[in-house]
Image (cartoon, rainbow, N blue to C red):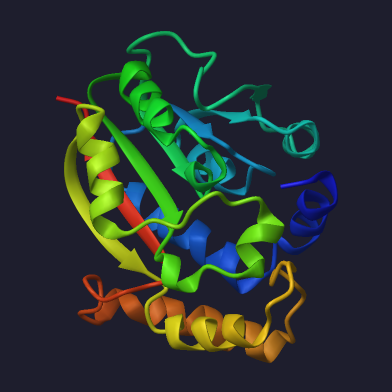
Amino acid sequence: MDAEEIAKSAALERRHWWYAARRALVRRTVKDWPAGRAVDVGCGMGGNTVVLRELGWKAIGVEYTETGAEIAASRGIPVVRGDGRRLPIADESVDLVMSTDAWEHIDDDVAVADETRRVLRPGGRALIAVPAGMALWSGHDVALGHVRRYERDELAERVIGAGLVIEDLRSWNVLLRPVVKARRRSRQESESEMEAVHPVLNAGLRAAVGLERVLPVRRLPGVSLVVVARKP
């Protein structure tokens, strides 16, 4: 993702339904876990890192891009420049590795998974979210610098292959998948879909994602996949 796209996302992050729903997902997933040391790999502008810190975690961000790291630091988030394939983190030193929408940007995701296991303490957890399904591949992915979208079995293989034990693997943003698929079929140019949304529509989209918490849709195809894994 280039500097212009990162700056655009930063301007949208606080209010946009997708970022807000993703922060809610992180909060809901982590809130009952004992807080400890955490690293947010590919933290971007740091919105999800803030969620961890609000929940009592001693969380830092690792960000590859200069623009993203500068924006995160300007928000008071401890952040270091680093590569997910070679994390600047000591062996077995953190209780949680979180990475939301970062693995799809990295060519060698096997190395990223291995690094996740390396830095986790025994019993530590990984929380990983990635875009789902090559059937949804579009110019949006190209504009954001993605190299893949993940199938469920593929993501499970990466996580298990690194020596982690999967506790949960579910789809996210399921109800809106038909809308996303139709929109991407109609837009072939390499252009990000992240743009300002009317407040009423923004609230409606956020509510649609939130509704999934009470519906049996976690095994259906979604726009994203979320996995929670543990280091034995």
Is residue 6 shown left or right of residue 40?
right
Q: Is residue 223 visible in the rendered structure shown here? A: no
Position in image of residue 208 (x %, y %): 45, 84
Q: Residue at x 57, y 37 (%)?
A: 42
Judge by depth and name the residue closer to the eye, 133 or 48. Answer: 133
Q: Residue at x 25, y 82 (%)?
A: 215
| Quarter of the picture holding the C terminus | top left
Judge by depth and name the residue closer to the eye, 122 or 180. Answer: 180
Measured along the vertical axis of the image, is residue 224 above or below residue 211? above
Q: Residue at x 51, y 18 (%)?
A: 87
Position in image of residue 104 (x %, y %): 50, 47
Judge by depth and name the residue closer to the eye, 145 or 66. Answer: 145
Q: Residue at x 35, y 47 (%)?
A: 30
Position in image of residue 220 (x %, y %): 25, 76
Position in image of residue 224 (x %, y %): 42, 64
The image quarter in which residue 144 lies? bottom right
Is residue 57 shown left or right of residue 32?
right
Measured along the vertical axis of the image, is residue 11 above or below residue 71? below
Q: Is residue 166 visible in the rendered structure shown here? A: yes
The image quarter in which residue 78 lies? top right
Measured along the vertical axis of the image, is residue 23 above or below residue 98? below
The image quarter in which residue 174 lies? bottom left
